[in-house]
Amino acid sequence: MKTDVLPDNPYVLLTPGPLSTTKTVKAAMLRDWCTWDNEYNEIVQGIRSRLVQLAGENTDAYTAVLMQGSGTFCVESVIGSALPQDGKLLVLTNGAYGQRIVQMACMLGIETIAVDSGEITPVDIERMEEYLRQDASITHVAVVHTETTTGMLNPIADVGRVAKAYDKRFIVDAMSSFGGIAIDVLKLGADFLISSANKCIQGVPGFGFIIAHRDALAECQGRARSLSLDLYDQWKTMEEQNGKWRFTSPTHVVRAFDQALRELEEEGGIERREARYRSNQRTLVEGMEQIGFCTLLEKQSQSPIITSFYYPDSPLFTFEEFYDRLKVKGFVIYPGKITVADTFRIGSIGDVYPEDMERLVEAVKQNRFW
Ligand SMILES: *Cc1c(COP(=O)(O)O)cnc(C)c1O
């Protein structure tokens, strides 16, 4: 088992990020790195080109831009930089992260249509198509791939097909899936695909990245509604100055990310990592179901990233006690985030293996207080 449970690292994170990382990823941060010289810039350039390679088979038309901040900053930089003044955004929502896109677009003064399908149903492509048919002023379509709120895997290939049939720019929040689920940006027709350092690539938090079609990115010149989140300007600086960030770059986090990418390659790439995550998730669900827990989502829309479970049907159960007991045993889980049912969530991503899930299930069994 590679997972470290060191004295100073007393639990495994079974959360949607930040997540458990390897000792070697953390060790990459244990020295000070110059940010100005070629050596550092080469690392940045290497990361950018490897990210593009990870995004599908035929990605010559794509580039990668790194952006300071958490994942939300990167989503906001895309929304605020891609939409023209007279643009109109359609967002398919079925959870908090889709709603966050709607919220940021509204705050930026962008005309926005939310096509909501509740919390436990995949996004509504039929209704989206109706809007696109009737409203030619819509310029962009946005959707979340894995809606981390529940663990729902949205059918982004179908969304992309319809968005492209109507010639719209297509934005995908693949924050919690990129690196853990194979994605092909060209086949998807994705113009902007967003993810961050601390999810399935298994780095630490501090920056995110946008894999963008060069044509779509070129259109963003002069559109940004924020200086620091200007995606076009960030790209231009990185491109023209060989990997330089416009403002202070998170050097340690970038080094850790470089190491994390190396470890993804060593593991055998995204397909192998996806297989491990699937195996983690299967082990988790099988074990929890044996104890009597039920999953929130139907199997066909369940991602291998994070799983929502209903609370057991007992007045004795509280999430707080469940959480505390598992934490003492070395596992940190996650509260639920939906309104229609009482749930908690357990992540299956990070430097976590099926054996860890077996240990977790055993800990749940032995701490049954309800
Ligand atoms: C994690 C996540 C984000 C970004 O959240 P931050 O807290 O800003 O890193 C956005 N969308 C999805 C689907 C996520 O899972």
Image: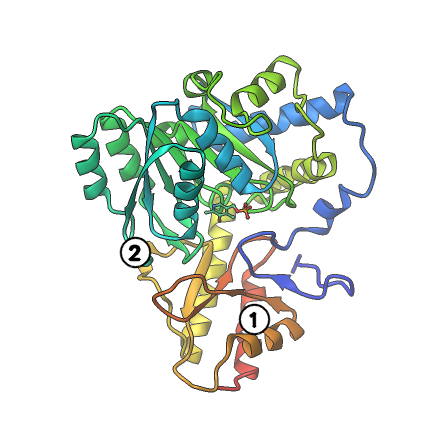
For the residue labelled by badge 2, is the local secondary structure a helix, a strand or a loop? loop
Indicate the quadrant where residue 311 lies: bottom left
Indicate the quadrant where residue 219 lies: top left
- Determine whether 222 is above or below 286 in the image: above
Q: Position of residue 29 (x, y in %)?
A: 77, 42
Q: Position of residue 342 (x, y in %)?
A: 41, 71
Specify the amino acid type for callout 2. Gly
Mark 2 neighbour density, 10 Å: few (under 14) some (14–19) many (20 or more): some
* The furthest residue to the right: 31
Foreground: 353 or 200?
200
Determine the residue positioned at 33% across, 57% down. 119
Q: Is residue 269 visible?
A: no
Foreground: 235 or 108?
108
- Determine whether 143 is above or below 350 in the image: above
Specify the amino acid type for callout 1. Leu
Residue with the mark numbered 2: 118
Q: Where is residue 34 in the image (x, y as percent from the top left)?
A: 81, 28
Colour setting: rainbow
Mark 1 neighbour density, 10 Å: few (under 14) some (14–19) many (20 or more): many
Q: How many labels does the image show?
A: 2
Foreground: 298 or 123?
123
Q: Position of residue 326 (x, y in %)?
A: 60, 74
